[in-house]
Image (tube, rainbow, N blue to C red):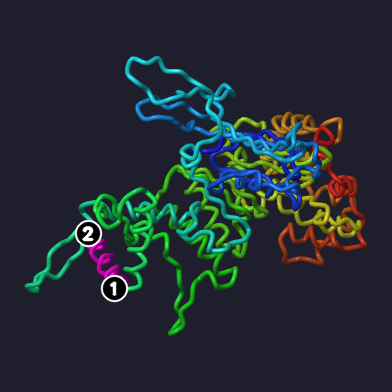
Amino acid sequence: MRITRLQIENFRSIKQLDIELPQICALVGPNNSGKSNLLLAMQRVLGRDWVRVSSFSEDDICNRDPSLDMKIALSFAPPLQYAKFKGVAPVAISTLAFECKRYKIGSRKGERRLEQTCLSARGEAPMVPRSAPKKNVQARFEPLIGIPSEVRDQVPFIYIGTNRSLRDHLPGARYSLLRQLLEDVDRDLHTPDQTVKVQQVDGSEADEPRIDRFRSLMDQAMDILRTEDFARLEASIKRNALRQLGFDPDTEAEKLDFFFAPFDTMDFYKSLDLRVREGDFEISATELGEGIQNALVLAILQAFEERRKQGAILVIEEPEMFLHPQMQRSLAKTLTEVGATNQVIYTTHSPHFVSIPDYENVRLVRKGDAGTTVRRSDLPSDTARREKLRKELDPERNELFFASRLLLVEGDTEKLALPEYARRLGLDLDREGATIVEVGGKRNLPEFAKIATSFQIPTGVIYDRHSSDFQDNSKDDESVFNSELAKLARSDGSVRVWELCEKYEDHLRKAIGEQRYQQECQKYPSVSKPIRARLMAADAALAIPEPFGDVLHWLAAKAEPMGGKK
């Protein structure tokens, strides 16, 4: 099961939003853009046993405007199923909608109320029987009112927020990973092949079903707990209950019995605490620091993946929290594996959790005059394109998803030299959210530019007129290729293209003169070309060649999304 569509109106920073959610969805955007609000909207209506009007406050209404109604609607695939009575065909429920409105008239005018609605694929309330079916009686139908608990229980929603409190993920919490894992363990416990060796009176051993052994031990525990005070309490409750129900407790006690019973197996599992022992010291893991609790929550997530659980909806805020880069990469792989059979939706600031070949899984979150908006790529995804991009897989290149403005360059030489020129010009590219990405060669520039512009990221492209990517016998092809690169430019300035007259080194040689260029090269005789280019760019005695000044001033400018404000 997965959420296919999320619609939100007037919730926190979100004025109006209607987005499709893929099986694996990475929400990327700057701080305060509204990423967490997207997850919070889902958590408010799916991540708790009951949703009431008190589940929301005036702080949840956009701009705290009392005149606004708030709406959160989620569509599912496959649809949820609901049968009001046994023996009738279930109806399909495609969408769950929650609307927080105000009473318009009457004594409660101005108070908030919450309307919860099930909707069919046509956007209408499903029709259900008014009463249980009876033989030879024509069934009468009515719209389904509210969201029955049987419907909500079909949505296996698991939320992991930035507060990595282990307590929220222990089996006592209904919507927790560990609860789901132990429910599987409990089901397995009841199967006939689950046995345990039990010593007989004659000293021999025999196999006994684990569930029978558990019940026997629980009965023994109850015998120990059944003190005289306990027995009197139990008898008092039974006697008074019989009186209240019209029975004589002295003569009719056998007609209705009331008694305390021990845990069943799942109740026992739900009561478990996760503890840690170091030497002779033992403590609940819920009392440990945030870093250790985070590690345990993620360990439970990895155990979830190892057991190949299916059909859950996992929503995670910043999975990279507290993790070194190596562990971020490891967890990113885990999320991908979990996402093969479960839906995974997460926010992230880490390039390890997004991938250019899987750009269709990325949603860019931005905040402007229209509140929080979400952009997805409109570039078609196919196997050939993904495989081509996978050959160029590099976490550093994934930074393009986090850029407010982006400059694409052919290789390391430009990537190392241009930031030095920016520093000399007094431009702080990092502060402005600008990113320079080298794409691994001139031939890759168009594909990376298509991806970036499909997300409406203002993009610049700088290339060499003559590149080593093209052999001498293919210069005609390179001329055609250069023409295609030049056509990427847009009249509104959201996409800029610059051509260097030759390769970077030849361009620099022309700019500063052959003699000065050779002198500079002799200063750095034992370094690679990219490093030498960076050192020369950092030399304040050398002029900054054109068009690098224009390029960098464009890159450092405050960016609006392509097409203006959104």
Q: Amino acid at mark 1?
A: Ile
Q: Amino acid at mark 2?
A: Asp
Q: Is 219 included in the stretch rendered in magenta?
A: yes
Q: Residue at x 57, y 39 (%)?
A: 388
Judging depth in this view, the residue of 115 and 470 nearest the camera is 115
The answer to which of 512 and 342 lies nearer the viewer is: 342
Taking the image as shown, residue 255 lies to the left or right of residue 276, namely left
Q: Name the residue furthest left.
A: 202
- In the image, residue 124 above or below residue 258: above
Residue 424, position as x, y percentages in the image: 90, 59
Q: Tell me, for residue 284, which label it has, or none.
A: none
Q: Position of residue 217 (x, y in %)?
A: 25, 67
- Mark closer to the chain start, 1 or 2: 2
Q: Residues within 10 Å of mark 1 (few under 14, many from 20)?
A: few
The residue labelled by disc 1 is 224
Q: CA distance from mark 1 to mark 2?
A: 19 Å
* Tag in front: 1 or 2: 1
Magenta extent: 210-226
Point 76% across, 40% down: residue: 457
Q: Position of residue 484 (x, y in %)?
A: 74, 30
Q: Is residue 44 inside the magenta stretch?
A: no
Give the structural element (helix, strand or loop) at label 1: helix
* Quadrant assignment, res 229: bottom left
Helix, strand, or loop for circle 2?
helix
The residue depicted at 77 percent of the width and 45 percent of the height is 406
Q: Quadrant of the C terminus?
A: top right
Residue bearing the label numbered 2 = 212
Give percent across and percent down for residue 226: 30, 70
Magenta stretch: helix, strand or loop mostly: helix
Whether residue 563 can be seen here: yes
Residue 303 sits above or below residue 482 on the image:
below
